[in-house]
Amino acid sequence: MPSFAYAARYVYSDTVTRNDNLLRISAYNDTYQTSLMSAVATEPRSTLIQFMDSFGNSTHHARLTSPHSEFVILSIGTVRLRKPSALDDASLESMEYDENALRFLVSSPLVSPARVKEAAREIADGARSLLETVGAVVDWIYANVEYERGWTTVATPAELILETRRGVCQDMTHLAIAMLRSLGIPARYVCGLLVTQPGETHAWVEYLHPRQGWIAADPTRGQRLSAEGDLIKFAIGPDYTHASPVEGTFRSRGTGGLDVAIGQLLSDNRPPSLEDARNLIQGPGSAQTFWP
């Protein structure tokens, strides 16, 4: 039962009088991950209202109205992880999905299946089953898209990644989602932590197996099936716009943004504390957003 800590610090050039944020930094609950303990806090202390969004993400609305020039977000949790049993394969023609899967087959703000369909068909040429198709897409992205920071933004669409063949984990995930959807496979975006390497939030794709549910694959690391216990899921959605860890606005005469963000698996067996999260960002940081 791994425990984790996550912290992010935002800094501003002038006093902020109001800060409103949606926080999706608590462990997700589904078939293969169970949240056993969770806590979220901010410094300075803000008014927190917790709710479940339409994708099942545990979300906190944080509102801070006292003047501040720095804003820190903290999250801790303990989860139980379960690995999917050996995956049985299925022909693409035989797969059937219910209405809940339809929103992960159509276009979303950063994912247009139609714009990558021709390339996806060429990449998956010869694949006749679900696992063969997922494997072809994941392998191609891993081999052909270079990991490069600074080339894209959080608003870069999947088809641009296909054209430029460079980006970060968010971009590779969007491209995989677009290709899989274009081939008739429901696929969704996941944000969370890569527990084998302390660092920033990571992104990967989940595709829907008709009998075994949502299965993780990681095109950034070239993994058709992620290793047991190496990913902790925070939020899911059709793409990043629905599953970003932090989304918000602030009121100030100055500018500001993310200074440092880091998550880490805790190695000892004691319950995690908010101090564990706070200790991750002690001292100066540098702007970071995605793995590695």
Image: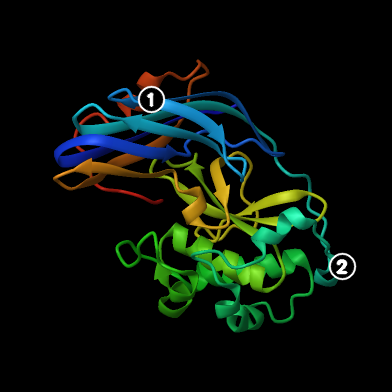
Total tally of numbered discs in the picture: 2
Crowding near the residue tagged with mark 1, few <14, some 14–19, many ≥20 C-alpha atoms within 10 Å: few
* Amino acid under disc 1: Thr
- Name which of mark 2 and mark 1 comes first in the sequence: 1
x and y percent of residue 80 in the render? Answer: 64, 29
Of helix, strand and loop, which one carries label 1? strand
Q: Residue at x 55, y 72 (%)?
A: 112
Residue corresponding to mark 2: 94
Residue corresponding to mark 1: 47
Left or right? Give the position of 19 relative to 284.
right
x and y percent of residue 160 in the render? Answer: 43, 75
x and y percent of residue 272 in the render? Answer: 47, 20
* Quadrant of the image occupied by residue 198: top left
Nearer the observer, 122 or 226: 122
Nearer the observer, 155 or 142: 155
x and y percent of residue 16 in the render? Answer: 20, 36
* Quadrant of the image occupied by residue 231: top right
Q: Residue at x 47, y 55 (%)?
A: 241
* Amino acid under disc 2: Ser
Of helix, strand and loop, which one carries label 2? helix
Question: Where, quadrant-wise, is the N terminus in this rendering?
Answer: top right
Can residue 167 be spotted in the picture?
Answer: yes
Can residue 209 be spotted in the picture?
Answer: no
Left or right? Give the position of 288 relative to 243.
left
The answer to whether the residues at label 2 and label 1 have Cβ atoms under 8 Å apart is no
Tell me the CA gap for discs 2 and 1: 49 Å
